[in-house]
Image (tube, coloured by chain):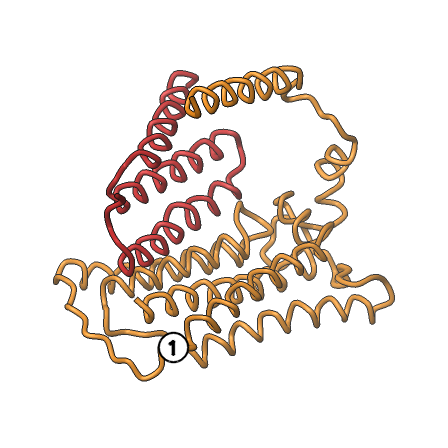
Amino acid sequence: MRRTVAILLLIIVAVGISLSLAKIPFGTPKTKVGRHYIDEGIKETGAVNIVTSVVVNYRGFDTLGEVTVLFIAAMGLGAVLRAHAEGETRKTQPASLVLYTGCRLLFPLILVFGTYIFIHGHLTPGGGFQGGAIIASGFLLIYLGCRERRINQAASNLVESLGGLVFVIIGLLGLVSGSYFLSNFLPKGTANMLLSAGVIPIIYIAIGFKVGSELAGIIDNLIEES
Amino acid sequence: MIFGISLLVVLMLVGAIAASIFRDLISAVIAAALVSLIASILFYFLQAPDVAMAEAAIGAALTAAIFIIAIRRAKRYEE
């Protein structure tokens, strides 16, 4: 009985969703603001990657909120897991030679790739969040392959705090320069160059370091606990 | 092109159904990671490489790793 009711409800929901989605004309612009970002984004912000110009420039304040949410999540996880993991030493079984060698070989390459992704965030696809996640996946590889290695918690926390601080200070400098919080007060430069787009590369480098150290810290806390 | 994308969508649905019916939780996590991986490929085809990159790194790698670490502490098989 319950099963038939559930299937019936599912069918009703599926029909409703597909009927309402079928009415939307895909591929046609529905708002004017999107067209504005595409047409004027490079001129107004200097960033060739339009996604980056929206994320860091047009809605930079929302990005600050996003970074704060991630920071609070990492801090809460650390507080919960740290509370009862003091003083325990884990016995680990060493990884196989292939995994050990492979991860030691790949780890620096992954770090370089993640750094490239967030330094070139205003030129190519990617940015601080993506680069940080790639760096954290490199640390995950180290935890799987070289099991006795640990990241330096103090250094990781320092990098994380410095990243957040740089973001807020850049925002306040925009306020000091005479316009609004997180305004792009540096010269835009020529488009397509590494040193262009004003404050966008600085903010994305700060976000990259911050996200990378936060996610690596989350993995470190979880592995320490398990 | 359209055939390849349809194949990917079908694979994604298979992965999603498998993730919900597997009794072995590690296998279920791998199936869920497959869904994320195919989602990132589809994002790439839909010309959203930024989202594709985040989905591949966070959805497929980090989330799966966190689930597996959690399962190691709990029971591996669902009753």
Specify the farthest residue to the right: A178
Q: Nearer the viewer, residue A139 or A51?
A: A139
Instruction: Tell me: residue A103, above or below residue A158.
Output: above
SS state under label 1:
loop
Measured as percent of width and height from the top left, residue A122 is found at 60, 51
Which chain wears orange?
A: A
Q: Which residue is mark 1?
A: A84
Measured as percent of width and height from the top left, residue A136 is found at 41, 61
Specify the subunit that label 1 lies on: A
| Residue beneath the point at 74% across and 32% down | A35
Specify the farthest residue to the bottom: A87
Measured as percent of width and height from the top left, residue B9 is found at 41, 25
Measured as percent of width and height from the top left, residue B68 is found at 30, 53
| Residue beneath the point at 56% across and 22% down | A13
Which chain wears red?
A: B
Dividing the picture into quadrants, the one containing residue A15 is: top right
